[in-house]
């Protein structure tokens, strides 16, 4: 095609154009489409904002719930072993009685099933449990509400386990004696509370068992 | 629309700037005012819905032309249009091809496969590379289409004794 043909083609095709009426309708249609798109964008932003707000509320509520159920509050209300008479040995006692959380970690408290054990077998059973892989950690505290309790190291866990290995059932220790409280937390959610008296006795309050480690 | 590189266009600006380009390409291929209007509306609606970013005006123009070609293909292969063509054929009425009265009419009489390439090359003045991207064909194929189309166009116009 020569330049002449091309220029003629361009000249002729310049006259090919949509009618003004069609262009008016088209503009209106496109404006409606743009408005619809803008509305859906606003809706999307609102939806995202709503979801974000819900998440914030849910997280805040979760934090509040966890804080309200941490062991420092429940432990303080747990039964003090010194108040339980020796005669009231009760197997399968849950020391806290409900689900709780320690340091933000949700824990399901299960009962330590001692139905197949006699009280004089508790010590050996406990020694095995404390040296098993199922033990998560042990908290140590000067009070039985475990406020500000620290986790003990492997050496101290081994020492505690060793106490049980040679322990024998004995009478209740002097209530006025200084005690050290331990909370053993296991992977399956089991929590067992212990206390030692002058490094000579170990008490399992939930089982109302008192052991001499001499 | 969120066009990072080029300014966002209002509906009116979009129509003013691109509707004629789309309409002409559609008309060059379909030779129908109604179809060309349908294609123009569909392409511009797709543009709004796509919410696409363009680097510059050339990029936007190339995207619109490519979509136009695709919409034309869809329309040509649509059941409705095929039905219309079948009805025309079934009516038994045959129209004798008139001698082209101008270049536009001569291009309209070219086989379908040459029309779009010829229009993009001579009216939109796009390069072979640009046309190959829009038509999704190799540059060799585009060159061949243009060469054969031009040859056929010359034949049509020589019969009329014009521009040769």
Image (cartoon, rainbow, N blue to C red):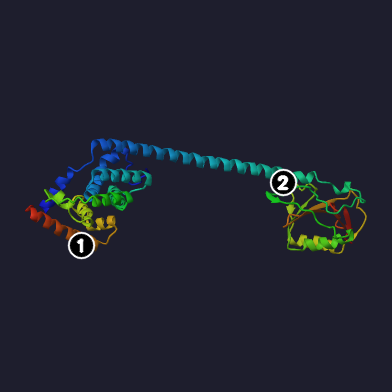
Which circle marks residue A70 in the picture? 2
**Which quadrant is home to the N terminus of chain A?**
bottom left
**Which quadrant is home to the C terminus of chain A?**
bottom right
Where is residue A69? Give x, y as percent: 72, 44
Find numbered disc 2 in the image and state the secondary structure of the residue it sits on: loop
The crowd level at tag 1 (other Cα within 10 Å; few <14, some 14-19, many 20+) is few
Where is residue A196? Give x, y as percent: 84, 55
Nearer to the camera, A18 or A115: A18
Where is residue B132? Give x, y as percent: 26, 58
Q: Is residue A128 above or below residue A207?
A: below
B118 sits to left or right of A150: left
Q: Is residue B4 above or below residue A121?
A: above
Locate residue B130: give its quadrant.
bottom left
Nearer to the camera, A121 or A204: A121
Q: Nearer the viewer, mark 1 or mark 2?
A: 1
Contact flag, marks 1 and 2 (Cβ < 8 Å): no
Where is residue B123? Give x, y as percent: 19, 50
The numbered mark 2 sits on a residue in which chain?
A
What residue appears at the point 61 percent right and 42 percent down from the top-left corner? A58
B42 sits to left or right of A179: left
B150 sits to left or right of A59: left
Which circle marks residue B144 in the picture? 1
Residue B6 visible: no
Locate residue A192: give its quadrant.
bottom right
What residue appears at the point 64 percent right and 41 percent down from the top-left corner? A61
The numbered mark 1 sits on a residue in which chain?
B
């Amino acid at each position: 095609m020569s330049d002449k043909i091309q220029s003629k083609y361009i000249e002729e095709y310049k006259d090919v154009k949509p009618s003004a009426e069609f262009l008016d309708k088209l503009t209106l249609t496109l404006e409606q489409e743009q408005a619809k798109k803008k509305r859906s964008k606003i809706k999307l932003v609102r939806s995202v904002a709503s979801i974000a707000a819900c998440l914030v509320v849910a997280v805040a509520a979760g934090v509040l719930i966890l804080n309200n159920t941490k062991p420092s509050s429940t432990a303080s209300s747990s039964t003090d072993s010194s108040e339980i008479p020796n005669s009231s040995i009760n197997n399968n006692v849950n020391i806290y009685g409900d689900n709780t959380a320690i340091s933000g970690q949700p824990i399901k408290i299960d009962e330590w099933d001692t139905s197949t054990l006699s009280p004089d077998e508790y010590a050996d059973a406990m020694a095995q449990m404390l040296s098993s892989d199922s033990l998560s950690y042990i908290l140590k505290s000067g009070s039985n509400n475990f406020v500000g309790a620290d986790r003990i190291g492997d050496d101290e866990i081994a020492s505690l386990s060793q106490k049980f290995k040679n322990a024998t059932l004995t009478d209740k220790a002097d209530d006025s004696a200084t005690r050290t409280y331990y909370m053993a937390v296991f992977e399956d959610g089991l929590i067992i509370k212990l206390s030692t008296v002058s490094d000579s006795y170990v008490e399992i309050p939930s089982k109302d068992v008192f052991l001499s480690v001499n | 629309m969120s066009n990072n590189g080029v300014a966002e266009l209002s509906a009116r600006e979009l129509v003013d700037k691109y509707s004629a380009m789309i309409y002409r390409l559609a008309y060059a291929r379909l030779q129908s005012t109604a179809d060309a209007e349908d294609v123009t509306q569909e392409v511009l609606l797709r543009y709004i819905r796509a919410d696409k970013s363009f680097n510059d005006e050339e990029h936007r123009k190339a995207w619109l032309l490519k979509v136009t070609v695709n919409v034309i293909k869809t329309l040509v292969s649509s059941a409705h249009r095929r039905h219309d063509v079948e009805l025309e054929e079934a009516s038994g009425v045959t129209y004798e091809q008139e001698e082209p009265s101008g270049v536009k009419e001569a291009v309209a009489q070219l086989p379908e496969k040459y029309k779009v390439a010829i229009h993009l090359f001579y009216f939109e003045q796009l390069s072979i590379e640009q046309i190959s991207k829009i038509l999704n064909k190799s540059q060799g194929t585009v060159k061949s289409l243009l060469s054969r189309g031009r040859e056929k166009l010359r034949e049509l116009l020589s019969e009329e004794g014009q521009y040769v």
